[in-house]
Amino acid sequence: MKAWILENQAPVEKKPLMLKELPDPHPKPHEIRIKNVACGVCRTDIHIAEGDLPLKKSPLILGHEVTGIVDETGEKVANFKIGDRAGIAWLNRTCGKCKFCLSDRENLCPNAHFTGWDADGGFAEFSVISADFAFHLGEKQSFVEMAPLMCPGIAGYRAFRLTELQTGDKLGLYGFGPTATYVLQVAKHKNIDVYVITRNEKNRLSAKQIGAYWVGGYDNRIPDMLDGGIIFPPAGNLVTHALSQLDSGGRLVLGPVTMTPIEINDYNLIWQERSIISLAHITRKDGVEFLQLANDINLKTSFEVFPFDDLPEAFIQVKHGKVNGNAVIQIAEDETIYYT
């Protein structure tokens, strides 16, 4: 098979990924093989390629927003069959035995493995994964449309779940990139009013078009106190700002993997049982629930498609913020018939 591999980390402008011909992988008894149709580009891919994250294996196939068709199954697989639409996300494997795995918190498993980091990912013609960690995909959206749902979509849904909001509550979204657009659509479906706070005028317009209840900047006075909030930019200074807009009992979710320093000098910002929680990876439950919901409401995604041979250029475009929505690599033709 053809695959883009990373052997030595370097700035993506130096194009450290190399296109090579590798032996076709085949599944073990509990695994499936997916013929990849599309794979989204995540900033984590760039962090690994450039050395911001350590290289755990070499050579490595990056990519953890994988969608395609099952074309081979291991002899002990019962939950997938050849021809099924399937996806692979960031969580690739867990131990299944630790206190986190046994308490519905497998995202915190200390022995977890991740797609495109510990295990080969989706920038290749085929991917192999345990059938227990693959996802069934719906039939209303194309593989290209669904690729971004496998990471920013599922992660955004987990952030939304962590707010613990209910119908009739008010949610604040701080920053409004692609992940926030998915959260907004889910929240609207659940009859939660969404307040979008962002500096970017283009993103404000997008939020209004998707159906935000209120849109403004960080200097605008918000008309209501919020029941929950999600911060997307890695800006620690936004934490006190968001807390000041939370009602009693509100919960603030920090979406980034890292943030600049956070300082809370006024205890009143967290008094009245306001709380802060960070987002760490995803669980399979998050993926199953979100992908079903995305299919049910025909969730809309924003993306720009790049040919398989243009992956290195796509990395550069993503790094410099020149992609409209999510970058998606099209690996093979999509011949599926979709149902609306």
Image (spheres, rainbow, N blue to C red):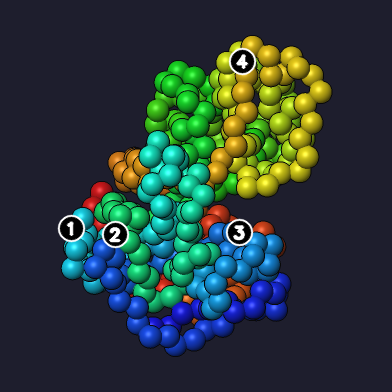
Q: Closer to the camera: disc 3 or disc 2?
A: 2
Name the element at disc 4: loop
Name the element at disc 2: helix
As drawn, the label of residue 273 is 4
* Residue at horizontal 41 percent and vertical 56 percent from the top: 93
Q: Whole-percent x and y of residue 5?
A: 53, 78
Q: Which residue is mark 3?
A: 43
Circle 3/circle 4 CB separation < 8 Å: no
Q: How far is mark 3 from mark 2, CA to CA?
A: 26 Å
Q: Residue furthest bottom?
A: 21
As drawn, the label of residue 131 is 2
Above or below for 60 versus 64: below
Q: How far is mark 3 from mark 4, CA to CA?
A: 34 Å
Please indicate whether residue 297 sits to the left or right of residue 302 in the image.
left
Circle 2/circle 1 CB separation < 8 Å: yes
As drawn, the label of residue 78 is 1
Name the element at disc 1: loop
Query: What's the amino acid at mark 3?
Result: Arg
Q: Earlier in the sequence, mark 2 or mark 4?
A: 2
Q: Earlier in the sequence, mark 3 or mark 2?
A: 3
Q: Residue furthest right?
A: 265
Q: Closer to the camera: disc 3 or disc 1?
A: 1
As drawn, the label of residue 211 is none
Please indicate whether residue 60 sits to the left or right of residue 273 in the image.
left
Q: How far is mark 2 from mark 1, CA to CA?
A: 8 Å
- In the image shown, does 241 or 317 lie closer to the viewer? 241
